[in-house]
Image (spheres, rainbow, N blue to C red):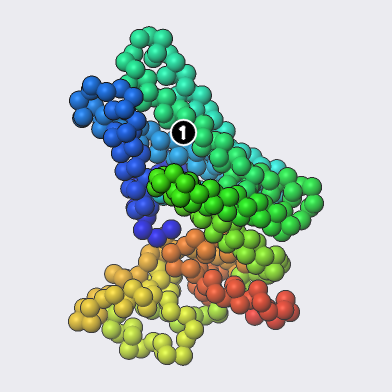
Amino acid sequence: MKGTVRLGRIAGVRIGLHWSVAVTAALLTLLPARGLYPYAHPGYPTWVYWALGLATATGLLASLLAHELAHAVVARRHAIEVRGITLWMLGGVAQLRTEPRDPRTELRIAGAGPAISAVLGVLFTGVAAGMNALGAPDLAVTAVSWPAGINVVLAVFNALPAAPLDGGRVLRAFLWRRTGDRLRATLGATAAGRFVGWFLVLTGFVSVLAGGSAAGLWPALVGWFIIAAATAEACQERLRDQLAGTTVGEVMTLWPVTAPSGSTVAQFLADAPLGRLRHSAFPVLAPDGSAVGLVSVTRINRMPLKARSTTPVDAVMRPLGNLETAEPEDSAADLLPRLSSSAERRALVLHAGRLVGIVSLSDIGRAAQRPANLRHRGRPA
């Protein structure tokens, strides 16, 4: 997801914040600080409401992170590599490198998030009840009760049987186990997702028109996201089905044009035959022939013309550690979701540690439209 700031790692999982999470943080701070807390418990200094509002927002964002970490931890226990977790305006995303291989694994990974949210809701409720029993100020009790309710709502909402929500994953696991057909299961879960999405959109707009409040725009926005995500997931699953049995080596571009590490941008542009190439990004190779990164035409175009003669390619490339990589024998279908969520929309193909090709999202899309017997392009020796 573009526009993400990395925060570090928790339990070995990379954590990032999308810029849009600032909108959520602001709303979660503003609503209780300016609305709920002063209305329910007047008479306190303004800074107290704002401090509790900020604490509430921090607690809720931490709850979202715990929800996604639960998915990640269970996935890793099933030998599925987790690329990272990104929190954004409408929640969070745990990015898995591969899809679950069977319905049982899908069920366990999907159910972990709502389960943690439900547990947090119960814990916050218990803390609020204990504080009330000990005679704590009502404002403090309310400040703890609100996250309790939000976590319960988060658990219930995510449990709805509609992709891409966690409940949609559970539904897909059930349909997958019942029919033995992953594609049919996905299409059923995404159809349910679109139904729920349109329901939220319509009810949101009806709320705005009937009540005159802008609060209905939030469920409408969530519904629109669910519709878009469910539609994209259905399309991606159809592509996966069409790519069944196809390897990365069969769809990649063999021996792509490369940029030498250490050369200037101007030298690369002068020497590379850019005009006849389909790709607009090029692997960068070290003097020993190992791949060290990828430089794109888009990144070069952002540079001032005068700087190109003195700026090395290495300064504008995306390092290898931030890129997707694959082996020629890897499944093209498994690579598809990784490319869809990557910044460059392409992967370097390595064989025995050496660059042998490059594959883009559009390469895989074109390959899916061709007959299976035309996808074979050979593999490196």
Query: Residue at the location (79% across, 52% down)?
Result: 180
Furthest residue in direction right, as rendered: 179
Mark 1, residues whose alpha carbon is within 10 Å: few (<14), some, or many (≥20)?
some
Q: Which residue is mark 1?
A: 150
Task: Say if 66 sits above or below 163 in the image.
Answer: above
Give the SS element for disc 1: helix
Residue 156: name its quadrant.
Answer: top right
Q: Amino acid at mark 1?
A: Ile
Q: The C terminus appears in which quarter of the rendering?
A: bottom right
Q: In this figure, what is the number of numbered marks?
A: 1
Residue sitting nearer the eye, 120 or 352: 120
Residue 332 sits in which quadrant? bottom right
- Residue 16: x %, y % from top left: 39, 49
Q: Is residue 80 left or right of residue 262?
A: right
Which one is nearer the viewer's eye here, 361 or 33? 33
Q: What residue lies at 37% left-to-right and 78% top-to-bottom?
A: 297
Q: Residue furthest front?
A: 210
Up/down of 128 relative to 80, above or below: above
Quarter holding the N terminus?
bottom left
